[in-house]
Image (cartoon, grey):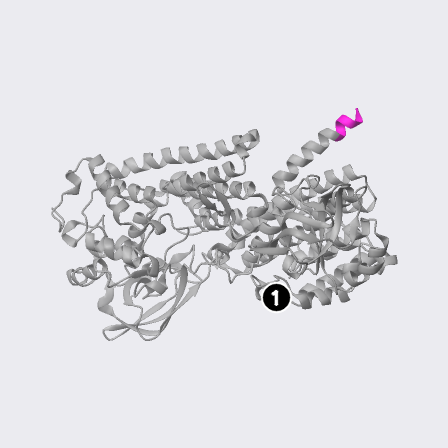
Amino acid sequence: MSNRLNVDYNAMDDEVFRQMVLEWYVENYPDELRFPPERMHWDESGAWYMQLAEKGWLAPGWPSKHGGMGLDVNKLLIFMDVGENYGVGRTPDQGITMVGPLLIQHGSQEQIDYYLPKILSGENIWCQGYSEPGAGSDLASLQTSAVRDGDDYIVNGHKIWTTLAMDANMIFMLVRTSKEGKKQQGITFLLAPLDLPGIIVRPIVNLGMHDEFAEVFFDNVRIPVAASVGGENNGWNIAKALLGHERVFIGSPKLAILAMSRLKSLANAANLFDDALFVEQFTALQLDVEDLTDAYKRFIEVLKRGGEFGPEVSMLKIWNTETLQRISEFTMDAAAEYAGIWGGIETDDGLVRASAEFIGSRPGTIYGGTNQVQRNILAKAVLRLPG
Amino acid sequence: MEDISLQSRIDLLTEQQVMIQDSAIAFIAQDEELRKVRENRFVQPGFDNQIWQEMAELGWFGFLVPEAYGGMGLTFADLHTVLIQLGKGLVPVPFTATAVMAAGAIVKGDNEALKMDRLPSLVSGDWKPALAWQETTGGIDARTVEVKLKDGRIWGKKILVPDAGGADDFIVSVLSDNGTELYMCGKDASGLTIEHEQRVDGGFYGQLNFDGVRVGDRVASAGVATGVIESVLDEGRLAASAELLGVMTRALEISVDYMTQRVQFDKPIGSFQSLQHKAVDLFVLSEISRSVVLQVVELFDAGASQIECALAASRVKARCSDAAMQVTKETIQLHGAIGYTDEANIGLFLKRAMYLSSWLGNASAHRASYAKLKLQAETADE
């Protein structure tokens, strides 16, 4: 199968492919957007999204018959790796990473034909409505209700931690369609435009004073039953399968490697490598990151062999997010009094903001299942401890 | 909100301490929602002048000032209960910088006329001096002074002056032909420019650039100035540690409360053992910190030697800086996603801890300083 450019990327030599991607990034990706310190809004990243769309590289993992690049796991990993190394920032990409795979797997032909082209053209930007104020770690307890009224659902409720909802015009969400039986069994996957009457989006400012999240309120919102995916009360299973996609990337050591390089710049600027104690502590973190990289490679091999991750992938998330936090804490330590300012310290490699490193590494142990939940998963599903 | 500290279980307070503590508790109870903190964030001068006046009326600025100069001549045993409450309430004022350090510099200095003239207006809240001693980051060494005093004019740069925008005058350490001295300098003096750097907690650090600024009154002469600076820095470290103790204590109280209210998996999250143990570990950290603060308060009040005070100041600042960071960052985790929002108050405690724990030397700087001083002291004993 070939994509619309009729290039069979998977047949290319790995190095040739890597070079091709890199060269195109170097030529086309805006310099000022490399390594963005926080998640970019559409006004910053939109032009890049459209450029990727035009190139046909917006959806590297989608099959080529749906307009993706059709990359196999190996090439997809290379593609991601080059982007991370070059500092290519994320676009509002939930349509590509979540909605596309969801519809290709569980959607009707009609839904596929209707929604996928709009993602590829940039007409539809999606956000994810899963969590609610009362349903965080315990997602299955979600209460946003969808009640049948003829061919529509009437939706009422409140979604939160909706990343970049203010940049999106579509939402994919989990709603409660039944209160019978186990709470996981009464959940349905639903798609909706955000400009329907009764929907209000409110940005939430995070500790870094950036409005990356939002909350979305639904007040008697009428959504056609035809916009549900995978059948009524089947949403939980679908969402769980989709999360598998997300969990791969949560183990990538790239953020930790970058944080180490900023710490190194800071330490050079402050002459800290003359201090034996600093060197010892720095090296301990360096090895934490190198060993994380080995663990990540080991897991990636599973994907390359065509396998999937089980509950064991939680260990990657724990080690990765907590290593990143330790690096940020040591960066604060190295910054001395400048740990207490918003601004940063000038180094040969640019400004290093210790407080931003520290604050920015906090949510890693909270989102995508807190690290307490990850430990519960490992205890129960891997160590098979009782209880 | 219930006090979770061990104070009522195991500590004995004097009647006077209880009275002072009660007035401080009542004071911060006026703004339990921390609206004042939010109102004053990132807006010059970074603190609230009305709060400053209310504190003056409670007499707090005069606690460490002798009666002869309009103060009350009290001790840290009395003041520390106020400082802990100021930390708990995140009260947005540079209390430690002005009422402990700048006031202390004048009191401990050797200009009697200046003391008679200026200290009463400091006590009444009408005059706010700020101490400008620091020239490099790292926060420990006050002996290396490179800002020059030549022919009555100051040249050079001082950094990290908390909330400099609200100060009326600066007390500046300078190197003259006589050695290190402390001089006053008006905030509007010609040749003085101030750059303000935003702090994470919403206040500001000022950088003072002196370009031939004419000096005002001398605060401490060459014979005493270095000792004065070192002494007020150590008192500042103790005061900041007491504030940090308040910050961590309230952060934990709020979190224990939240863990009792917040339900997931059909139970309060406080019923999960992994979170209970985390909360208990933070409690142990905060009570270890309180133990050190109480002992160091006693030591300072007993008139310990400079080296004993320096050791104790490093010990208490190292412990409280570390513990406050540990506690406030873990209380974010205990709150989950809501803890990572600006609208939840718990983040304000983390940010105050980020400021106070790095100001006047962070934990590693003070551990290093402690090791060095300890070695010196032991060598001197032999």
Comparing A72 with A185, the one in front is: A72
Subunit ID for the residue under disc 1: B
Q: How many marks?
A: 1
Relative vertical location of residue A196 with respect to residue B164 in this rendering, above or below: below
Q: Position of residue A219 (x, y in %)?
A: 37, 74
Instruction: Residue at 42% x, 46% y: name it.
Output: A374
Q: Position of residue A220 (x, y in %)?
A: 34, 75
Q: For the stretch drawn in magenta, what is the main secondary structure?
A: helix
The residue pinned by badge 1 equals B36
Relative vertical location of residue B3 with respect to residue A198 in this rendering, above or below: above
Comparing A192 with A85, the one in front is: A85
Q: Residue furthest top?
A: B382
Q: Position of residue A333 (x, y in %)?
A: 56, 41
Q: What are the residue bounds of the magenta stretch? A: B377-382
Q: Please, what is the three-letter code of the amino acid marked with disc 1?
A: Lys
Instruction: Residue at 41% x, 50% y: name it.
Output: A37
Tell whether B42 sits left or right of A19: right
Relative vertical location of residue B89 with respect to residue B238 in this rendering, above or below: below
